[in-house]
Image: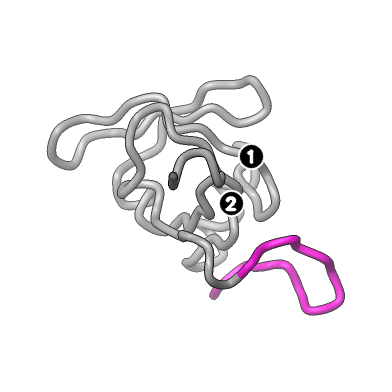
Amino acid sequence: MTWTKGPKEKTGFMPDEKQVTLTQMWAGQTGIVVQVQGGHGVVNRLSALGIIPGKRITKISSMLMRGPVIVEVDRTRVAIGFGMATRILVQLDNKATE
């Protein structure tokens, strides 16, 4: 299951802009959540943490290999597992890609 904003909703995202998974972001980078990929359990869990398409997210830190990823959403810091972080597609801010 893939959770994105529908065609009737205005997302403001340009398809040619840089989109990466949360695990590919550097600490301190900010972007907008574009898509959450996975089943109902993953989507519901991330939704309960406030990680939904259209939300601004900042990667705070992560471990070297496959440890937890700490992100900030709505001025709240949460830690999510590496597997869940790979399922979150983020469009980086213009400042972060220059």
The kind of residue tagged 2 is Val
The kind of residue tagged 1 is Arg
Q: Secondary structure under badge 2?
A: strand
Farthest residue to the front: give it. 98
Farthest residue to the bottom: give it. 7
User: Is 55 positioned to the left or the right of 70 in the image?
Assistant: right
Q: Is residue 72 above or below residue 30?
A: above
The quadrant of the picture occupied by the C terminus is top left
Most common SS among magenta residues: loop
> Which of the 4 image quadrants contains residue 69?
top left
Q: Residue drawn 50% across and 53% down?
A: 90
> Which of the 4 image quadrants contains residue 35?
bottom right
Mark positioned earlier in the residue sequence (1 or 2): 2
| Highlighted range, magenta | 1-14
**How far from the left and from the top, in percent, is residue 50?**
65, 39
Q: Secondary structure under badge 1?
A: strand
Q: Residue drawn 53% across and 63% down?
A: 17
Q: Is residue 64 above or below residue 1?
A: above
Colour approach in the figure: one colour
Circle on res. 33: 2
Q: Using the image as rendered, state which of residue 16 and residue 36 is in the foreground.
A: 16
Q: Residue drawn 31% across and 49% down?
A: 24
Q: Which residue is mark 1?
A: 56
User: Is 44 positioned to the left or the right of 85 in the image?
Assistant: right
**How far from the left and from the top, in percent, is residue 9?**
84, 69
